[in-house]
Each structure stands twice: as C-alpha cells, then as structure tokens.
Amino acid sequence: MTVTSADRKPAEAVSSGEPLEYTPRPAIWADVPDEKWNDWRWQMSHRLNTVEELEQVINLTDEEREALNAEGLFRVDITPYFASLLEPDDPWGPIRHQVIPKGRELVKFDSMMADSLAEDEHSPVPGLVHRYPDRVLMLVTTQCATYCRYCTRSRVVGDPSANFSRADHDAQIEYLRKTPQVRDVLLSGGDPLTMPQRMLEDLLRRLREIPHIEVLRIGSRVPVFLPQRITDDLVEMLRQFHPLWINIHVNHPKEITPELSRALARLADAGIPLGNQSVLLRDVNDSPEVQLELVHKLVKNRVRPYYLYQCDLVQGAGHFRTPVSVGIEIMEALRGHTSGFAVPTYVIDAPGGGGKIPLMPNYVLSMSPGRIVLRNYEGFITTYREPDEPYQRRRLYLEKPPREEGAQKGVAALNAGEHLTIKPEGYDEIHRRGRKGEPPKRGRRNYEDRYD
Ligand SMILES: *Cc1c(COP(=O)(O)O)cnc(C)c1O
C-alpha cells in the first residue's frame, strides 16, 4: 500500500483554510449564533440542570427523573456543548451516564465514605492536601464547568456559596512559602480553569515567586466540558508560568471531539505537557477495547495517558465501581500490545489516605540466586542472568544533596538498610505481653516512625 500525503492529513485543519469541524448541535440550539455558542461565558451561563431543560435535549427515563427531583442530590450542571454529546435515547450511553444522575446514585453501599482518601486529615490549611513528601494538592475552587456523577470530592465541590476565599488562598501560599520540601504544586478543586482568569493568574504568579517550587500542575476537565474556554488569551497567560503541566480527564473516546482536539493542540503548542487521568467506570470504559481506543486517540492528540483510577469509595459512585480484576485485565491488554507511552498506570487511591498504589499483572514468575524468570505480554517465558560479581554501587555525581524525606522514606528506607522493620501503630505494646513497664527496645535497627 502506498501512503500519500493525503493519508497523513492531520485530524485538524487549523491553518489550512479548510472549514473547521464541529460537533453537531441539538435542535434547541440551532439558532444560537456561532459567536455565542463558541463563547465560554455563554456556555457557562446556559448550563442545563433541571428536568425541563434536560428534556429538551434527551429523553429522560423515570430513574433519571427520580434522581433529578431528589433532595440532596449532588449538583447537576452541564454545558450546552457537552450536552450536545449526550446520547438522547440511551440512558447507558457513556457520555450521558457520566453526567446525568440516576436514582441508584442515591443508594448507599458498604464501605462508602464521604472523604474516602482522608484528604481532610492531611490538610494543614483549608484546601491544601500535603500527603506526599515533595508535592501538594492545592484545591483552589469548588466550582466545575460540568459535574461528574462519580465525583471523588463531592463533599466539597458544587456549592457556589462554599468556595475558597482570598484568605484561604493566602493561607495556602503562606504554608507553601515556609515548606521548602515542596517542589511540585498541583492545582485542582473543583476546576481551576473555571476561575476568573485574573485570580488564577495571580495564584500562579505568587506560586512561581516561591523559589523552591519547581513545577506547577493544573488538573482540569474544562478542555473536555468547555473547550471554548481554551482561548489564545488563556493559553498566553498560562505559558508565562512554565514549567506548567496540565492533566485533563477523559474517560471515553467519544469525548474527544474536534473542539477538544483543537483546545489540546493550543495547549500542546504552548509547550504545556499534557496528561490524562481517567477513572475506570462501569458501563463507560470498563473494557480493554474501549481503553485501547481511548489511549490511541489521546496520544494522537499529544496527551499522554497518566493514571487510570480505580473508582473511589464515595457516595454516588457505587454503581460505577468495577472489580479490581477488570483494571488488571485492561492493563494486561494494553502493556506490550501498544506503545509504552500510551499505557497509563492503574492505581487505587488508598482508602484512609495512603495515596496512590499502582497495580499491574505480575511479570516476575520466579527467582533464584543469579537468575530472574520473567514472562512477557505474549506469555513467552524467559530468564535474565544477573551479573556474577558482587554488586557495589559507586558514589555517583549529584548536583545537590537529596531532599530529606524524614519519616516518609517508607519501604525505601528498608532497602537502604536504614531500618529493619516498619511497625503498625501499637505493635510494640501488643507484643510486650506480660512485661509491663519494660520500655520497648529502641535503636537504629528498630523503625519507630509511625505512619498515622
Ligand atoms: C494524586 C495526588 C498528588 C500527585 O500525585 P502524583 O503521583 O505525583 O501525580 C499529590 N497529592 C495528592 C493528595 C494526590 O492525591
């Protein structure tokens, strides 16, 4: 087969003069002038949230109506652009299922928690979650462009009267100023790209002024829900703050429209490295085939699949959960079968606040002194012979001394021989049976740091 230049035509014809492709609009918006439709402010102020509004775009089921009329429902709000992707006649359509509530989201399930990641416990000041040694999660707003039904932060997100204040932002920045081990700040919420641009710019500028902060990141689903917001002006503002990384959130290939592709091209052209964090969602993307299609479409848009999250134990997400084996099955179907950079890391964000824990199939089958037995994605089994000489590492050149992680060094400290054990809280007391009053042995070979 010969490949012509026409076959290599990029998906987007931004500069070629060809008419741009757009997602078709439902009839109710047929008469909206393009300048309005393409204006993110118009999109934000015409979001849909009632039965009456949604009925003009989709045929609601009884279960959807029941949810939309229920007391205490997590906020519903959908931009007209994203609503134009909803499957009008299929309540199990992968777009519709993510944003239109169903009665079953109100059903409680075993092990459900409000704050399943214990973020509030790891919060030195409101909105700042400092769980890892060198990076923090900074919640800067409670507002989003559209609300996901399985929101992991539904306890704080959605209420327009409970947003972070200027004083909260000041306190967050003050904490970061005096916490030199933080080198990476991840702005999230809510969705930082829904904030007034001046407010976001001011935050980014103040963070950039802190010398020990090396990398800034924004986690945002705005490109997906409201690609109109990714204007040249916004991108020019963001690119002042490099190195700045953005992680978006796409769960299904249908979300990657011509509009999203153009927004991503703008961000990538401004030198912003793009990643994607998706959530493994039952009835949306819980198959190897959908995941493969998704990661291929992402990398074509210069977005590197970053994490695939196991669904959190949070109210509203019960019916989206899958067995963990589904995630493992997906990882087995991706690794080796496609480009390495298209394979995300599958993680469980540990309930109770342990952070992200990666999961994958086992590739190590066995070991003996000097040999490791491995299998590849095809089931081919091989042996790697280790060097015969005893291994001694030379002192390697470093530009600066490594940052001190203190008590968080964890299992790496066991590898380094700095500690012999890590003990659960109360371990020594339990095992001092009958020897009350005798103090527990302490010393270099007794890891006393507690992980609480
Ligand atoms: C996910 C997360 C981060 C960032 O983790 P990375 O693995 O570096 O992407 C930081 N803090 C908190 C609390 C998080 O949940």
Image: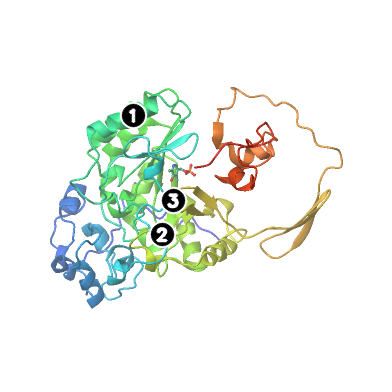
* 322 with respect to 336 (left or right): left
Q: Which amino acid does label 3 sit on?
A: Asn
Query: Which class describes the residues within 10 Å of circle 2: few (<14), some (14-19), or many (20+)?
Result: many
Q: How far apart are marks 3 and 2 (CA)?
A: 21 Å
Return the mark for residue 223: none
The earlier-in-sequence mark between 3 and 1 is 1
Quarter residue 392 falls in: top right
Q: Name the residue under label 1.
A: 173
Residue 1 in view, yes or no: no
Residue 306 in view, yes or no: yes
Q: Mark 3 points at which residue?
A: 276
Q: How far apart are marks 3 and 1 (CA)?
A: 26 Å
Question: Any atom of ligand 1 within 8 Å of the CB at mark 2?
Answer: no
- Give the residue drawn at x 48%, y 57%: 295
Q: Name the residue under label 2.
A: 313
Residue 211: x, y in percent? 43, 22
Indicate whether 224 appears above or below 134: below
* 60 with respect to 137 (left or right): left
The earlier-in-sequence mark between 3 and 2 is 3
Query: Which class describes the residues within 10 Å of circle 3: few (<14), some (14-19), or many (20+)?
Result: many
Indicate whether 392 appears above or below 283: above
Q: Nearer the viewer, mark 2 or mark 1?
A: 2
Q: What residue type is labelled 2?
A: Leu
Residue 78: x, y in percent? 23, 58
